[in-house]
Image (cartoon, coloured by chain):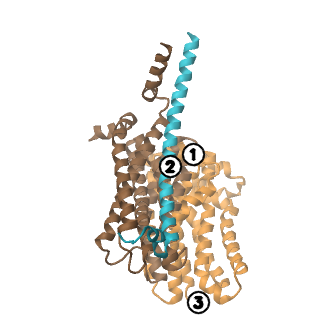
Chain colours: A brown, B orange, C cyan
């Protein structure tokens, strides 16, 4: 177990294994997203209440799921980094934050756009949208804090602490915002929660959610590899790996 | 080691010798033999006394948040309307938001002077757990910021035509809530103390985390106005305080270590 | 198929601006992140290669 964790922690090993895993996740992401999009946009039946504007659910809900999951995985990576000093975990956390912020933005934007045909307004202080907005601020805080430090190690540890503090607070914020919303406006009509959803409606949603998750994993693997190159660019193994071809090519040219 | 550090900083910042009385208090903890039995309590007490003394010598820093609080509350009737009925409906929220911002304003200096003069490093080197010592520092911050804000709020409530019967709840909810705010805010203050321009970043980090306290604090006052029971709100505020009292000290200690060593 | 024709599909039953803008922004963002990640990776690899080539040529000149 420990040996495995430390092996996972070695950037070199991670660089190799992620190269093998990455194509599978990209393929799954493309396949699932294309299937889900076609199904959701063209084949799923229109909602009896909201008509075709209901199709926004297929981007809104997966983005919202991912936004929350990315924050949690960022905090878990931060914990792993703080406890076991595994640098790869911090590199992953560093590349997750912008994607999480982007997903939160997508969820907010699609929610706002969805609000126009549903509520007749671009913005409503709906519980779900409000907690998404707060989540966006939490993401921006983590990103800003990481950028504010000049020393990379301090930046990593500070961002890890903040991500962990944030992840403890997210459920508290979520429940208090829900409570606040029901107090001020008896929940008449929320965007996504509905009593019954026929199979042909939720199945594409499941596919889209899985597609978004595959996309997240694939992109995180890819960008973590870049982050490894950036931070370890002076290491011998990186230079050997990258320059293997260059050195050979030069040798051939001179021959 | 730590005791000398405390004494030195105490002496450095004492410009007037009229406060000689505090020196005897500062001497009290420098009994190294007692460290094994009661070291923690002695250190916590020493930190409390030291921070209180230092802050009381810089009265402007204690008064500024209160003046800010009053000023912000003055701005709203000017910007919105002097109509008492309108003001009364928004008063709970205004008072809470203004108090929250005033508490936030004072956070930046929580560890700043200790960081600049090096006594924060002494605190880190102390054999006592840093979490306990930072709780002492936060307690002083609350005592000189949160509590005065809570006591002052009813006065500003009169100016905003806050309906009768909610004044006690306002003060109580603010007293409970600002304690949580100080604890949560101290995490942000500890994270940004090493940064040259940490002030704006601090508010960006801390404000989203303040939202639950704000919801239940302002909710308590609103419930009091409507005549609903406020015990549930106050109980949740208390629960938030208990949770932050349990978790925040560790985060503050970890953040201080990062700021000092980085 | 929930739509009778392609133009009906595009019209989305009168909700076209909402559905297509939400989907469009999402698609754009996903594509942009992938594009950014690719550019980033290529730049990093090129940077390392360039530095190695320079080090190589310096070594060559010295000999």
Secondary structure beneath dot 1 equals loop
Q: Chain of mark 3?
A: B
- Mark 2 falls within which chain? A
Q: Do marks 3 and 2 share a chain?
A: no
| Residue farthest to the left, as pictured | A1
Say which of marks 3 and 2 sits in front. 2
The quarter of the image holding the C terminus of chain B is: top right
The residue located at (44%, 82%) in the rendering is B231
Q: Is residue A120 above or below residue B201?
A: below
Residue B157 vs residue A105: left or right? right
- Spatial CA span between label 3 and label 1: 49 Å
Pick the residue in front: B163 or C12: C12
Q: Count how many numbered circles sit on residues in the image.
A: 3
Q: Residue B144's spot in the image, x, y percent?
A: 60, 66
- Looking at the image, is A171 positioned above or below residue B159? above
Q: Under tag 3, what secondary structure? A: loop
**Residue B255 to residue C21: above or below:** above
Give the spatial CA distance, label 2 vs label 1. 9 Å
Q: Residue at x 64, y 90 (%)?
A: B85
Residue under label 1, please give it: A149
Residue B236 visible within the image: no
According to the image, label 2 marks what residue? A158
Q: For marks 3 and 1, give the one nearer the viewer.
A: 1
Judge whether residue A123 can be spotted in this image. yes
Point 39% across, 72% down: residue: C4
Q: Secondary structure at mark 2?
A: helix
Q: Quadrant of residue A179?
A: bottom left
Kindly report the distance in space between the C-alpha atoms of the residues bearing marks 3 and 2.
46 Å
Q: How many C-alpha atoms fall within 10 Å of the one at disc 1: few (<14), some, or many (≥20)?
A: many
Please name the residue that numbered disc 3 is placed on: B164
Depth check: give the residue in front, B68 or A229. A229
């Amino acid at each position: 177990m420990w040996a495995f964790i430390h092996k996972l922690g070695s950037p070199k090993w991670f660089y190799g294994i992620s190269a093998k895993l990455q194509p599978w996740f990209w393929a799954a992401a493309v396949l699932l997203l294309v299937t889900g999009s076609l199904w959701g946009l063209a084949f799923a039946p229109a909602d009896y209440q909201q008509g075709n504007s209901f199709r926004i659910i297929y981007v809104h809900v997966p983005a919202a799921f991912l936004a929350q999951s990315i924050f949690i995985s960022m905090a878990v990576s931060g914990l792993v980094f703080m406890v076991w000093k595994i640098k790869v975990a911090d590199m992953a956390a560093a590349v997750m934050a912008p994607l999480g912020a982007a997903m939160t933005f997508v969820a907010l934007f699609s929610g706002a756009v969805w609000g126009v045909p549903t509520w007749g307004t671009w913005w409503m202080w709906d519980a779900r949208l409000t907690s998404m907005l707060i989540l966006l601020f939490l993401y921006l805080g983590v990103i800003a804090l990481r950028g504010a430090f000049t020393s990379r190690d301090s930046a990593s540890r500070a961002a890890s602490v903040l991500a962990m503090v944030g992840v403890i607070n997210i459920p508290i914020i979520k429940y208090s915002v829900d409570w606040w919303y029901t107090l001020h406006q008896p929940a008449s009509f929320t965007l996504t929660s509905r009593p019954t959803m026929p199979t042909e409606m939720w199945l594409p949603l499941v596919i889209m959610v899985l597609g978004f998750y595959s996309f997240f994993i694939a992109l995180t693997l890819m960008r973590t590899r870049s982050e490894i190159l950036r931070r370890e660019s002076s290491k011998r193994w990186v230079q050997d790996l990258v320059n293997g071809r260059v050195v050979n090519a030069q040798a051939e040219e001179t021959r | 080691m730590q005791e000398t550090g405390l004494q030195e900083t105490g002496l450095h910042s004492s410009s007037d010798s009229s406060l000689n009385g505090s020196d005897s208090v500062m001497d009290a903890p420098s009994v190294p033999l007692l460290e094994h039995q009661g070291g923690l309590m002695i250190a916590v007490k020493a930190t409390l006394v030291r921070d209180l003394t230092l802050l009381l010598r810089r009265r402007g820093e204690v008064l500024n948040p209160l003046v800010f609080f009053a000023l912000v509350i003055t701005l709203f009737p000017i910007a919105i309307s002097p109509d008492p009925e309108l003001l009364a409906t928004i008063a709970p929220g205004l008072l809470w938001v203004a108090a929250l911002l005033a508490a936030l304003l004072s956070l930046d200096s929580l560890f700043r002077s200790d960081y600049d003069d090096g006594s924060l490093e002494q605190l880190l080197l102390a054999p006592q757990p840093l979490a306990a010592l930072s709780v002492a520092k936060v307690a002083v911050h609350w005592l000189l910021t949160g509590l005065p804000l809570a006591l002052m709020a009813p006065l500003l409530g009169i100016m905003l035509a806050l309906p009768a019967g909610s004044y006690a709840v306002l003060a109580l909810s603010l007293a409970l809530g600002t304690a949580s705010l100080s604890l949560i805010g101290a995490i942000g203050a500890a994270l940004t103390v090493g940064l040259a321009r940490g002030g704006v970043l601090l508010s960006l980090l801390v404000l989203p985390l303040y939202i639950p306290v704000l919801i239940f604090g302002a909710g308590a006052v609103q419930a009091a106005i409507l005549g609903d029971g406020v015990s549930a709100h106050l109980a949740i505020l208390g629960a938030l305080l208990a949770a932050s009292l349990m978790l925040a000290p560790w985060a503050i200690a970890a953040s201080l270590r990062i700021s000092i060593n980085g | 198929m929930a739509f009778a024709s392609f133009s009906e599909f595009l019209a989305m039953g009168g909700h076209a601006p909402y559905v297509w803008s939400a989907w469009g922004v999402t698609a754009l963002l996903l594509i942009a992140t992938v594009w950014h990640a690719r550019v980033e990776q290529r730049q990093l690899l090129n940077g390392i290669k360039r530095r190695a080539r320079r080090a190589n040529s310096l070594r060559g000149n010295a000999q």
